[in-house]
């Protein structure tokens, strides 16, 4: 889904402005927290990072993940939910301007603030690593809604769980008749991201995918559409006030807790009478 709970506020990152201005920050030290976490996931054909879109700390971690893989000579490509399939920076030089990069990705700043994602993108481009749009193009969403073959892409229990996620993600405001078609869009988006990751695969290197946490669930998301011989590691970045240990969970290979965000009812504005 575009932003967290469809109505999440935008937060400006307070770091990495120098990087966006064209300066390259030093990569994290090998013993830095993110570097250690990434190293523990390797080797892998792909690392799938699932974020909360409005969490500033998650975007910092994503940039550091890019820099860590670059420093190890392992980053095959950075793939993004935040840009549509068919867009990419592979044809651009490492010193391309931000405007050139945003144009190449057909970047939608209203949906995905560049201040949030630009640092990770720029770190990849400056290292000569392609950044690839992975999301289903909006022009294909209508066809996906009517494509009943997508229903068979998930087992019954997984499809039902995805349908419930759609209900909750739309604040229980969608008519029930729309749940099936909207679920097909989610499945089609996950499949498109999986295809982009597979296309970017390079022996001995790692593709990094940045997407919402729901998209990297092993039971429902992108992993369901990857080849069985494709070695992946899935990470959930979770903003929480609870004391949750890092490590594997039933849904992800690794959970990385981060500082909590202020409580917010993302559905309040949608329920407000007009």
Image (spheres, rainbow, N blue to C red):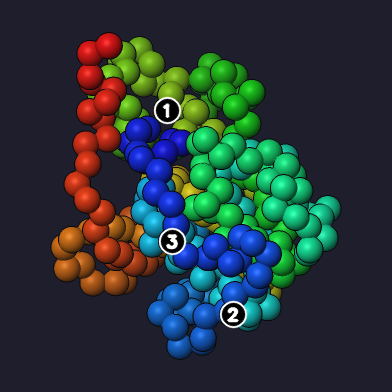
Q: Position of residue 58 (x, y in %)?
A: 41, 60
Which residue is rendered at x = 59% and y = 75% of the image?
25
Q: Crowdedness of circle 1 by 10 Å Cα count: few (<14), some, many (20+)?
A: many
Q: Which of these two is toward me, 199 or 14?
A: 14
Distance in Å between CA atoms under marks 2 and 1: 42 Å
**Residue that carries the numbered disc 3 in the rendered image:** 14
Figure quadrant of the C terminus: top left
Horizontally, is 44 left or right of 61 in the view? right
Q: Where's residue 242, x and y in %?
A: 16, 63
| Callout 1–callout 3 Cβ contact below 8 Å | no
The kind of secondary structure element at disc 3 is: loop
| 193 shown above or below 169 | below
Whichever of labels 2 and 1 marks the residue nearer the N terminus, that label is 2
Q: Which SS class for mark 2?
A: loop
Residue 164 seen in this snapshot: no
Instruction: Residue under label 1, please give it.
Output: 183
Look at mark 2 in the image and give the residue it sits on: 26
């Amino acid at each position: 889904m575009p932003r967290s709970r469809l109505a999440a506020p935008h937060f400006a990152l307070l770091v990495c402005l120098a990087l966006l201005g064209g300066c390259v920050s030093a990569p994290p030290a090998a013993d830095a927290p993110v570097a250690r976490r990434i190293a523990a996931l390797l080797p892998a054909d792909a690392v799938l990072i699932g974020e909360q879109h409005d969490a500033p700390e998650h975007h910092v971690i994503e940039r550091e993940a890019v820099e860590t893989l670059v420093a190890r000579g392992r980053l095959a490509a950075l793939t993004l939910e935040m840009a549509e399939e068919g867009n990419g920076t592979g044809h651009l030089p490492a010193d391309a301007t931000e405007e050139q990069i945003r144009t190449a990705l057909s970047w939608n700043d209203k949906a995905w603030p560049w201040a949030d994602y630009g640092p990770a993108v720029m770190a990849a481009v400056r290292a000569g690593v392609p950044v690839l749009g992975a999301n289903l193009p909006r022009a294909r969403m209508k066809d996906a809604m009517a494509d009943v073959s997508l229903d068979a892409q998930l087992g019954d229990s997984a499809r039902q769980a995805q349908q419930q996620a759609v209900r909750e993600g739309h604040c229980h405001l969608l008519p029930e008749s729309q749940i099936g078609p909207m679920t097909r869009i989610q499945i089609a988006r996950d499949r498109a991201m999986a295809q982009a990751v597979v296309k970017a695969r390079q022996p001995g290197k790692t593709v990094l995918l940045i997407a919402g946490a729901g998209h990297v669930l092993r039971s429902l998301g992108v992993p369901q559409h990857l080849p069985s011989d494709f070695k992946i590691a899935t990470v959930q970045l979770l903003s929480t006030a609870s004391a949750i240990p890092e490590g594997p969970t039933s849904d992800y290979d690794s959970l990385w807790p981060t500082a909590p965000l202020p409580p917010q009812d993302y559905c309040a504005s949608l329920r407000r009478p007009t």
